[in-house]
Image (spheres, grey):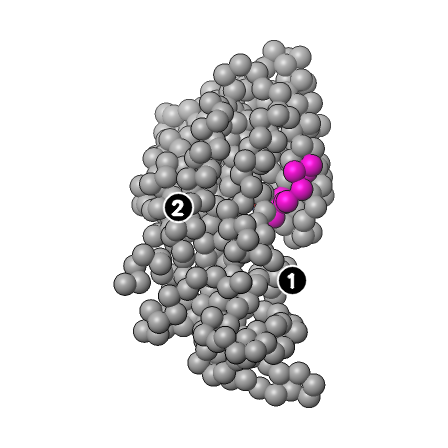
């Protein structure tokens, strides 16, 4: 089964471009809100790194979610899209002074701090402004996730966070400072996680740490468990909305919370992944020695995930209903890794056909580059194509 695409409306748009199905996006957001409403202490921040297209951000803002930012640029984009500063969390292992100042000026909700040197700078910059910054410590829980090595982040060997052993020391340092207020713990174990057991492992770790803190009579107000819920890349139509019900229920069941604690989530891929497709046209069909290539006008500069993570994106010929043939689908970039898929079944391909690379709404448009002096792809919402 193919996705639903208004192919005739694509005729006048320059390819390649990102197409965002707002019905899927809005459906996803209302599902999140419905599930979160079952619990009175859950709060979701959209991870802007997944997709910062202003039109997409604006729909997410309307749904009432907060944001998780990892750069000053993302903080600025979120403020511009109308997200209240009080719903912004700001993470990142290397925040510059300028970025920290931006957060301080707008009184963002919280800085997720990853080291003592960073804490010291936040304290110093906040002091210079006569402010007190809320900080949460990103703790590296040393929990492995069943996902691609390049997108697992919660292992001791990763650069992220503060080790569990150092947590007490960092808290002592923070408690002695006048311009930071220690309000929470932050975690994130990785991305594209479909095994709820990985999140259970995180909950168990959080519970252990909470016990340790409790022994010191410390109860933090906020537990931020990061993001990571995966999507079904193989079958984008079968489950276009991820299983948020099980995801939130897993945390509700396994996290041992203290009274009045809030749980924060930073979901990226699961929010925008399935609503977006990269739409490209076939430039040439080339006969190779023992295979045929469909050469697209989109390449790894438009969607880098296959080249970078060997990621799978379902490819559909949305212009053809002719019998299936087998193709290697490649881009025009001068790199042999510029391949979207090998031995792919497609309805017979001809020059000019529109191809959809599915499930590309997260880490697609935002990771595009200008390599080979190529133009960046634009993004269009389904509802603007009339
Ligand atoms: N919170 C933190 C601290 C993160 O590092 C990330 C993602 C998220 C939240 C959002 O995770 P999500 O819900 O999207 O899994 N470019 C890669 C993914 C990198 C993810 C980085 N961190 C890809 O294309 O698969």
Image coords of residue 106 (percent x, y)? 34, 34
Does residue 238 sit above or below 175 in this rendering?
below
SS class of the residue under badge 1?
Answer: loop
Does residue 363 sit above or below 144 in this rendering?
below
Image coords of residue 121 (percent x, y)? 50, 34
Image coords of residue 12 (percent x, y)? 32, 73
Quadrant containing the C terminus is bottom left
Which of disc 2 and disc 1 is earlier in sequence? Answer: 2
Please state if 12 lies on the left or on the right of 323 as rendered.
left
Q: Which residue is mark 1?
A: 310
Image coords of residue 255 (percent x, y)? 62, 24
Which mark, by number, is residue 26?
2
Is the magenta region chiefly helix, strand or loop? loop
Q: Residue at x 41, y 39 (%)?
A: 30
Asked whether disc 1 touches disc 2, contact meaning CB atoms under 8 Å apart, the reply is: no
Does residue 272 sit above or below 294 in this rendering?
above
Please state if 280 lies on the left or on the right of 199 as rendered.
left
Q: Which residues are magenta?
A: 190-198
Does residue 29 sit above or below 177 in this rendering?
below
Q: Quadrant of residue 6?
A: bottom left
SS class of the residue under badge 2?
Answer: helix
Most foreground residue, 299 or 69: 299
């Amino acid at each position: 089964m193919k996705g639903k695409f208004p192919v005739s409306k694509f005729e006048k748009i320059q390819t390649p471009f990102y197409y965002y199905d707002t019905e899927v996006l809005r459906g996803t957001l209302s599902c999140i809100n419905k599930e979160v409403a079952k619990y009175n202490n859950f709060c979701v921040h959209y991870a802007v790194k997944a997709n910062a297209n202003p039109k997409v951000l604006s729909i997410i803002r309307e749904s009432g979610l907060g944001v998780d930012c990892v750069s000053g640029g993302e903080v600025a984009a979120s403020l511009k899209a109308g997200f209240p500063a009080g719903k912004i969390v700001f993470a990142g292992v290397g925040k510059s002074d300028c970025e920290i100042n931006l957060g301080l000026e707008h009184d963002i909700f919280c800085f997720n701090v990853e080291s003592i040197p960073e804490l010291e700078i936040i304290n110093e910059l906040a002091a210079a402004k006569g402010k007190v910054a809320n900080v949460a410590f990103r703790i590296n829980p040393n929990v492995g996730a069943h996902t691609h090595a390049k997108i697992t982040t919660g292992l001791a060997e990763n650069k992220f966070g503060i080790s569990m052993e150092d947590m007490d020391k960092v808290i002592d340092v923070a408690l002695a400072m006048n311009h930071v207020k220690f309000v929470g713990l932050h975690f994130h174990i990785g991305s594209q996680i479909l095994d709820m057991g990985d999140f259970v492992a995180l909950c168990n770790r959080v519970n252990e740490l909470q016990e340790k803190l409790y022994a010191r009579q410390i109860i933090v107000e906020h537990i931020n468990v990061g993001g990571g819920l995966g999507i079904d890349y193989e079958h984008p139509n079968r489950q276009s909305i991820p299983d948020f019900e099980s995801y939130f229920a897993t945390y509700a069941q396994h996290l041992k919370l203290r009274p009045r604690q809030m749980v924060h989530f930073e979901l990226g891929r699961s929010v925008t992944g399935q609503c977006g497709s990269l739409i490209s046209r076939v430039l040439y069909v080339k006969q190779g020695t023992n295979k045929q290539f469909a050469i697209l006008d989109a390449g790894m500069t438009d969607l880098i995930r296959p080249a970078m993570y060997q990621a799978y994106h379902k490819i559909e010929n949305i212009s053809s209903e002719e019998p299936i043939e087998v193709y290697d689908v490649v881009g025009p970039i001068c790199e042999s890794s510029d391949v979207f898929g090998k031995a792919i079944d497609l309805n017979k391909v001809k020059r000019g056909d529109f191809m959809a690379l599915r499930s590309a709404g997260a880490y697609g448009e935002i990771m595009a580059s200008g390599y080979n002096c190529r133009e960046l792809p634009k993004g269009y919402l389904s509802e603007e194509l009339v």
